[in-house]
Amino acid sequence: MSARRPPRGASWLLRRFVPGDTRDRVLGDLKEVFHERSRTRGHGSAGIWFWREAVSFSVLFVLERAREAGVAPTRGVAPSWLDVKLGGRMLVKSPLLTLTGCVAIATAIGINAGFHEFVRIYFSAATQLESDDGVVRISNYDVAGGGQDPRILKDLARWRDGLETVEQIGAALRLDMGLVLQDPAG
Amino acid sequence: MSNGNLGEFEQMVLLAILQLGEDVYGVPIVEEIERRTDRSVARAAVYVTLRRLEKKGLVESWMGAPSEERGGKARRLVRVRPEGQRLLQGSRRAMEAMWQGLDPAHGDAP
């Protein structure tokens, strides 16, 4: 028997994610195969195999626990749950390809976010409101009605009421709708 | 005790245990399924399924003797319980009923 041991990190992963009622069985069986592989294919190859199995077991048992806990599949989250399951299976079958894909997507998202931030800082026109960094939406509010004012519908009605000839239907109509920055009375 | 149906992989694991007979544990189960189906299976999937089958009461397990090559850990041996065998027979009957009367040409690989 080889005196060498399976990779510590992979063993830790298994102890961390495989449930207690089946942990000894999994660790014992994997160590048995690890020693067999170390003898026939070399310790390095056996170590890589052990890591792959550790990731595979961890992912599948996390998914199994989620299934047991009933985290899955309500109607609303079903698509994202399916994504998680497929992602887990992909990670188990081709860990290197999956991790490479994740890194590539993360890099692309980072570049995209950086570009948008650059444009926002240097090219995006700011509003003239105070603290406009915090503004995420501007809408009209009907004080008398106590609710949001459907501005677009009102603008359409106003434009339509102002039509006098057929030719005007295709014409643009300029409306003055500047933002009120402060109380006119104040 | 379970009244549910068996999935395809659950049937494979139960049948592998029955095929192996004595001293059955995880490692030979994986090898038996791969040998008979001629395809590789995720080892973790076998253990997840074994655990699920035990929880359903279709499989029972007990500890064997510890061995040095397993780092002093004992093998957990498994056996199919009568309830598991009953469900397996039910699954087999259902499949045979579905195949019955079908043109044999439909079952042949192209």
Image (tube, grey):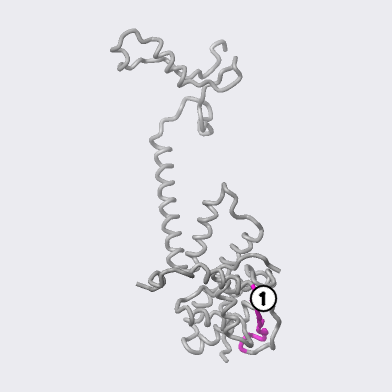
Outermost residue toward the front in this view: B101
Query: Which quadrant of the structure image shows residue A57?
Result: bottom right
A112 vs A88, left or right, is left
Residue A55 location (% of width, % of height): 54, 69
Q: Nearer the viewer, residue A33 or A183?
A: A33
Name the secondary structure under disc 1: strand
> Residue placed at 71% from the left, 81% from the top?
B62
Residue A128 location (% of width, % of height): 47, 25
Whether residue A11 is in magenta: the answer is no
- As displayed, is residue A47 above or below residue A128? below
Outermost residue toward the top in this view: A164
Residue A88 location (% of width, % of height): 52, 63
Outermost residue toward the left in this view: A167
Location of mark 1 (residue): B59
Residue A103 location (% of width, % of height): 44, 59
**Range of the magenta residues?**
B69-86
